[in-house]
Image: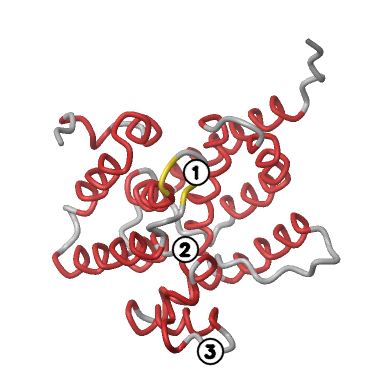
Amino acid sequence: MDFPPYLGSMPMHAITEIHGEPGLLERFRLEIQSFDEAARARLTAALDLAADLHRDDRRVREPYLNHLLRVAIRMMHHYRVRDVDVIVAGLLHDAVEDHPVELAGDAAGDNPTAAALATLADRFGPRVARLVAAVTNPRYDPDRDRNEQYREHVAASLDREPWARVIKISDFTDNGVGVIHTVGPKVESSARKYRPLVPVYRDLVTRPDTPLPADVKRHILAQLDLAEERFSAILDQPAHHH
């Protein structure tokens, strides 16, 4: 497959629309070229594991891997993250939540989540496992509002792990700002879920210990403003009568 020479500077949603998963895989390959050989090997191993675990997962109209690739590429390209553990954890940020049994294999036992995190620690080191744990949603109390519990979890777990905030912000940008690139009934429910989180992320981004350069923080805050405008446009429009 031939990709344009400017693939390295194309917006990710454009790559997604035009070239799909092969385009995002190629863009990932371009992004990791500047890392040393050991780092490239770890990043490729994490990508292979993510591709395997999520091989049957879909997200709206695309393979789930596209989302994970965008989260990782955004951190490398837009956030200028060079910390390999963080990018590995970005690729695997949904692995424990979505596929704990497959990840842990025979060791899954009664607590697949803990076993899956242990597997990640074995393969990629304890720090990767800790970062993934920080962005893994807990089991929710069925008697309480899910979205409210999600917000509480995000605030508490990211409070302690500054680098996990970076992963979660890239994830949120892909989900939240990406609402404009989705269609159908999911748009409204996504907007409802994500709009109350914008102030939470705004707070997390602007904290002094969030390890991102000042210009990157400004870029993210501008995107959060944009997301909030989009959510408002979706949720606050008067009902249409045809």
- Residue denoted by label 1: 174
Amino acid type shown at disc 2: His
Give neighbour class at mark 2: few <14, some 14-19, many 20+ (Cα, 10 Å): many
For the residue labelled by badge 3, is the local secondary structure a helix, a strand or a loop?
loop
Location of residue 165 in the rendering, given as x and y in whole percent from the top left corner? 53, 59
Amino acid type shown at disc 1: Asp
- Residue denoted by label 2: 93
Mark 2 vs mark 3, foreground winner is 3
Amino acid type shown at disc 3: Gly
For the residue labelled by badge 1, is the local secondary structure a helix, a strand or a loop?
helix
**Quadrant of the rendered image containing residue 186:** top right
Q: Tag 1 or tag 3, which sits nearer the N-term?
A: 3
- Residue denoted by label 3: 109
Q: Look at 70% across and 40% down and name the residue there.
A: 189
CB under 8 Å between callouts 2 and 3? no
Location of residue 77 in the rendering, given as x and y in whole percent from the top left corner? 32, 45
Give neighbour class at mark 1: few <14, some 14-19, many 20+ (Cα, 10 Å): some
